[in-house]
Image: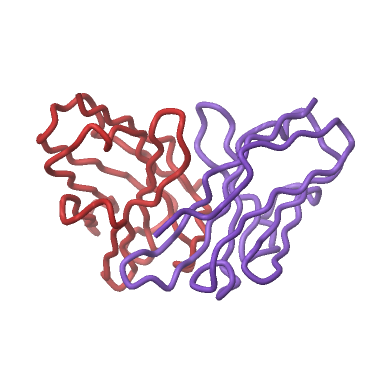
C-alpha cells in the first residue's frame, strides 16, 4: 500500500500562512477522522502537532490547525515563525487488513 | 514525566539478527497501543509494527515475517526482534505510544540507529 501523498516542499515568509496537503484514499484519510500531523526538526524525534484531523495536543501553538475534505487532509500554520522550519508528516489509520498506520512522504517547510 | 528510551541498535551484517528494546516510564506498556516507526537516512517516517493493549500485533508489508513485536509487562518494556536483516532495514528505529490505537502517536523515544552493512 502506497504512502500518503504530500508535497515535497513548501515555503513562506515570517508572519505568513502556509498549508500542507496530504492525499490518501477512502481506505485511510477519506474513511476516518484519524489523521495526525507530526513536526520533526533535524536529528530529533517527531512531535505530534495535530490529531484526529483538527485537534491540538496540549502545549501546541494555536497557530497550527488541521482540516479534511474527502480524502485530502491539510495542515495550516499561520503567523510563520523561524522555529516552524522543519519536516512535517501526516499519518492516517488505515483499514488495510495488515497495516495499521500510513505515513505521508513528508514536506520540508522553509521559512524564508 | 512520560518517557520512552530505545536501545539495542548497532551495526549488523546482512542476514543477521538484532533485538531492540524500549523502556517506558510514566506509562504502562501493557495498557497502551505501542508502535515501532523507522526512518531511513534522509527519508521519511515508515510505520513498522504495533502491539495493541489486548495483545494483537500488526506489521508493515515489508516485514514479511522477519520482525516480531512483543512486550515484557514486568519490566514495562517493548521489544522488536528483527531477523534476516537487509541493507534496506538501515534506519533509526523509534518506539512510540499510539494513544487510542488510531495513529495518534503522542509520546516518542529519541530512537536507536540500526545499520545493516
Image point (62%, 60%), residue name: A51
Q: Quadrant of residue B65?
A: bottom left
Q: Nearer the viewer, residue B30 or B116?
A: B116
Side of A17 where B112 appears, left or right: left
Q: Nearer the viewer, residue B44 or A86?
A: B44
Q: How many numbered marks appear?
A: 0
Q: In this rendering, is residue A1 above or below B75?
A: below
Where in the figure is residue B83, as x and y percent of width and height?
Answer: 13, 44
Where in the figure is residue B92, as x and y percent of width and height?
Answer: 36, 34
Q: In this rendering, is residue A26 above or below B20?
A: below
Q: Quadrant of residue A31?
A: bottom right
Image point (29%, 64%), residue name: B58
Image point (21%, 28%), residue name: B116
Figure colour of chain B: red
Colour mode? Answer: by chain
Where in the figure is residue A89, as x and y percent of width and height?
Answer: 57, 46
Side of B56 where A37 appears, left or right: right
Side of B112 where B17 appears, left or right: left
Q: Nearer the viewer, residue B94 or B7?
A: B94
Figure colour of chain A: purple
Image point (31%, 67%), residue name: A98
Q: Nearer the viewer, residue B6 or A12?
A: A12
Where in the figure is residue B94, as x and y percent of width and height?
Answer: 39, 42
Quarter of the image with the C terminus of chain B in it: top left
Q: In this rendering, is residue A44 above or below A24?
A: above
Amino acid at each position: 500500500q502506497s504512502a500518503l501523498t504530500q508535497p515535497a516542499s513548501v515555503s513562506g515568509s515570517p508572519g505568513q500562512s502556509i498549508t500542507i496537503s496530504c492525499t490518501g484514499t477512502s481506505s485511510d484519510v477519506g474513511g476516518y477522522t484519524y489523521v495526525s500531523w507530526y513536526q520533526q526538526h533535524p536529528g530529533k524525534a517527531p512531535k505530534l502537532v495535530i490529531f484526529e484531523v483538527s485537534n491540538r495536543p496540549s502545549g501546541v501553538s494555536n497557530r497550527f490547525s488541521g482540516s479534511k475534505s474527502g480524502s485530502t487532509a491539510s495542515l495550516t500554520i499561520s503567523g510563520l515563525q523561524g522555529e516552524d522550519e522543519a519536516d512535517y508528516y501526516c499519518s492516517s489509520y488505515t483499514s488495510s487488513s495488515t497495516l495499521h498506520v500510513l505515513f505521508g512522504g513528508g514536506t520540508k517547510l522553509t521559512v524564508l | 514525566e512520560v518517557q520512552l528510551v530505545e536501545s539495542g541498535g548497532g551495526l549488523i551484517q546482512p542476514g543477521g539478527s538484532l533485538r531492540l528494546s524500549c523502556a517506558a516510564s510514566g506509562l504502562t506498556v501493557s495498557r497502551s497501543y505501542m508502535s515501532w516507526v523507522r526512518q531511513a537516512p534522509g527519508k521519511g517516517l515508515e510505520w513498522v509494527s504495533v502491539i495493541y493493549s489486548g495483545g494483537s500485533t500488526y506489521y508493515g508489508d515489508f516485514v514479511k515475517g522477519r520482525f516480531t513485536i512483543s512486550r515484557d509487562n514486568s519490566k514495562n518494556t517493548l521489544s522488536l526482534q528483527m531477523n534476516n536483516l537487509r541493507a534496506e532495514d538501515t534506519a533509526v528505529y523509534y518506539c512510540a505510544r499510539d494513544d487510542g490505537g488510531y495513529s495518534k502517536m503522542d509520546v516518542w523515544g529519541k530512537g536507536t540507529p540500526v545499520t545493516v552493512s
